[in-house]
Image (cartoon, rainbow, N blue to C red):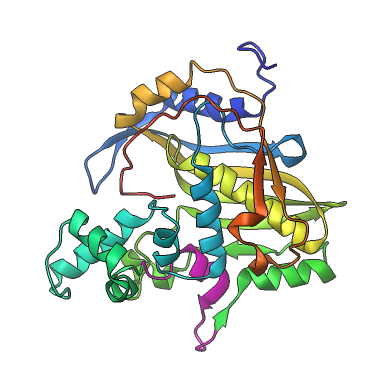
Amino acid sequence: MTTALDHSHPEYQYLDLMKDIMDHGVWKESHSTGVKLKSVFGRMCRYDLSQGFPLLTTKKVFSRGIIHELLWFLSGTSNIKYLIDNNVHIWDEWAYKKYEWAMKEGKTPETLTYEQFMDHAKSDPKFLKTWGELGPVYGVQWRNWPSSHGKTVDQLGWAIEKIKKYPMKKHYIISAWNAGCIYEMSGSHDASMVIAPCHTMFHINITGNKLSLLLYQRSADLFLGVPFNIASYALLTMMLAQVTGYEPGDFVHVFGDVHIYENHFDQCKEQLTRVPKAFPRMLLSPAKKKIDDFTFEDFTIEGYDPHPPIKGDITVVGGF
């Protein structure tokens, strides 16, 4: 059993980063909300997936939401309908943010509060089809990157098929950062993502019989977002390994600006008092050999015994 003095547990990478930010982070302020935060730049964590699934144990993490969000990304769609249908609401506020932009530009049929917007989204399929759109966010870029010649590029599908034939190549990079779809550069809300991608790009590598994945995340909300990101990309690594015929290797998490918002400081202090428990196991249905065939029922988490949840408000300037 891991003790408070045993820092060999991989979760201490996360906790030590949290302490680093709390102790040494530089104060910044969100330009859009005025919320203060502490930040450091350029950090890395590595998780060996043969040693357990990195679902944090020092607070309970919303694993159901992680799985559904990843399946939504993999579907290549931009509408939150799948998430709402599965009672996952981590992107709701971003859909409303896009609706707010449209209200300011006089493009909405009526003026709605967030609560009214969500009532419409849950009860009116036509409304959801129109206003549940987030623009070309992560999944769209992964699976349907809009190219200049009028076609779309399935970056992830391409990488999977190429890895099967040429595993030693080093260019298996999937990017969500598309300058033409980012409002500050495109100048159009209509054609842009609701948020510039935080988890920006990932690189798949085959070494020996193992598939590893390195994520570069330009902006990381350590308390709320990063636990999601760790588990999501670790799971993606496992799925990619299975469909290409390899064992899961490492998930390597590289951060640009990694920060803690001021309204999460008390929660972080509480989390830092907790001792990590053994990571759980994530089991994938071995019958699934294609990335598009996975469903929620194909994932089983065994042995997850976390500390209780620690709640905190999302600051709608970043995102999962």
Region of the chain picked out in magenta, as a range: 134-151
Q: Is residue 96 above or below residue 15?
A: below
Q: Residue furthest right?
A: 208
Residue appearing at x 31%, y 38% in the figure: 313
Q: Quadrant of residue 47?
A: top right
Q: Quadrant of residue 85?
A: bottom left
Q: Nearer the viewer, residue 154 or 52?
A: 52
Q: Nearer the viewer, residue 256 or 48?
A: 48
Residue appearing at x 17%, y 76% in the figure: 107
Q: Quadrant of residue 111?
A: bottom left
Q: Is residue 188 visible?
A: no
Q: Is residue 259 visible?
A: yes
How far across and down, in percent of the image, does residue 89 sit? 38, 52
Magenta-colored stretch includes residue 313: no
Q: Nearer the viewer, residue 56 or 272?
A: 56
Residue appearing at x 35%, y 22% in the figure: 266
Quadrant of the image for the N terminus? top right
How far across and down, in percent of the image, does residue 147 sit? 51, 81
Q: Is residue 282 left or right of residue 245?
A: left
Q: Is residue 20 left or right of residue 232?
A: left
How far across and down, in percent of the image, does residue 275 sit? 57, 18
Q: Is residue 219 above or below residue 163?
A: above
Q: Nearer the viewer, residue 265 or 87?
A: 87
Tell how many labels: 0
